[in-house]
Amino acid sequence: MRTSRFYRAWLWVLGPAWLLTASPSRAQLQTQISPTGANVVVTQSSAVFVSFTLRPGAIGAPTNVSSALGQFVVLSPSDRSVREVIGTNLVPLQTTIAPGQTGTAVETLLIPQDVSIRGLKSGLDRFFYERTFSSDVDGSSSVARLTCRLGSSAFGLFSIGQVTLYFDNERGEATVQQGSTDLHAFAEVHYNGTGLVEGTWEVSEPSPEGERTFRVIETIKTYVTYGDRILLRTPAVPGLPAQVRGQHVVALRISSPPSGFPLPVVSYYVTEPVQPQAQRTIQLLGPFDNTSVQQPPITFSWQPVSQAVEYRFELLEGDPHGLPSKLNVATDPLRALEPASAYPILLPQFSTEKRLVAFSAQTDLATTRFLLNAKHLQRLRRGQAYLWRVVALDAEGETVAQSPVRRITLF
């Protein structure tokens, strides 16, 4: 009886010790990073695809492993506990790992240009990107570290640094008429390193359901070298689709190399086609064609036309044989009688010739005449043949009517 009690007491003393030695020691969270290093540049941003392999210490239950943020740091070469934070990546990572398994967390890391510049100013040839992962089961943590080596864009990690999209008008938006076939989009792509750029040009057209669906219009595969920039363009023939009216969106999707940032999109609008209106003719009243005039003032007059808000009187250089004369002219607006630089006008009657405007005067709708006075004649040459005509303009400054050309000679 006493032996039995002694035996039970012995088990009571040894029992917990046996359980402690029989259970495995508590392991810590382990983390591996791939790649372990990357070449980055200071002339533009760099991007790298990073993979973290996570092995939790706790067993027997699912484990949530997370990292709230990543930090770019400069470490002292003599004492790695001395660190300076030069940038922060606020994108969190999280994964759930089944019992006895390993987990993976991935990110396309954008290394901003300003972070690389801060790293360069530290006087060292490298800085580091760190992430601390923590387990929610046992509270253990582990740090993964990527070495960022500073260098030129030619030898940097193959990545996209910047993408700019625009249309033929060098803007991120455009308007074309329905049925147009000459609209194109361009992409200026800045990259680091050497490799194969792969991607697609895609466009989204309006749909009755209002859903935005992209379709591929061209596949891109082009090999680039030594870190610089390339200019990509949508197919030359045909141009971007313009059969459906409404807003269209153009996107460049780059699958390789990584960019680390959302690629931009641009949009264009397709409007109803504008039917060209037949241009009307302004009837001239006087002077008559091939008239010789001697004394000022000389009155040029014409009949009014509808839709016109103002008229432009033009006196152009010409000679009796209809050939261009010397380019010694001046302009004289009606409201400001100071000379300005001459500009060429292509006359329909002489499709291969360009005449220069000697006078160009704007008049309002109520005025259908122009008075050539003595001050104007001082800038003209006696014995010189001149051509004159009138152009009617609408509120947008577009031509709605034009007169025939008449010739006068000054004596």
Image (cartoon, rainbow, N blue to C red):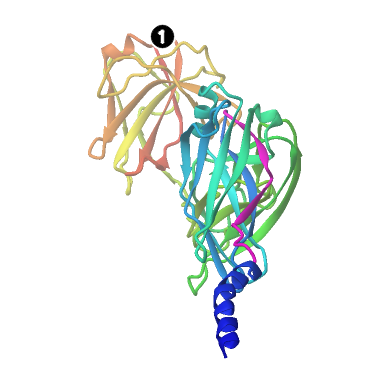
* Residue 339 quadrant: top left
Q: Residue furthest front?
A: 2
Lateral position of residue 399 relative to residue 176, left or right = left
* Residue 37 quadrant: top right
Q: Residue at x 29, y 27 (%)?
A: 370
Residue type highlighted by circle 1: Arg
Q: Is residue 275 visible?
A: no
Which quarter of the rendered picture does the N terminus lie within? Answer: bottom right
**Residue 393 belongs to the span the image colors magenta:** no
Q: Would you name the residue on which mark 1 appears?
A: 381
Q: Residue furthest bottom?
A: 1
Packing grade of label 1 (10 A; few <14, some 14-19, many >=20) is: few
Percent coordinates x, y for residue 268 in the rendering: 50, 53
- Name the foreground residue: 253 vs 46: 46
Say which element carries label 1: loop
Percent coordinates x, y for residue 46 in the rendering: 60, 38
Lateral position of residue 396 relative to residue 240, left or right = left
**Residue 35 belongs to the span the image colors magenta:** yes
Residue range highlighted in magenta: 24-42
Q: Residue at x 28, y 15 (%)?
A: 296
- Name the foreground residue: 167 vs 271: 167
Percent coordinates x, y for residue 74 in the rendering: 52, 32
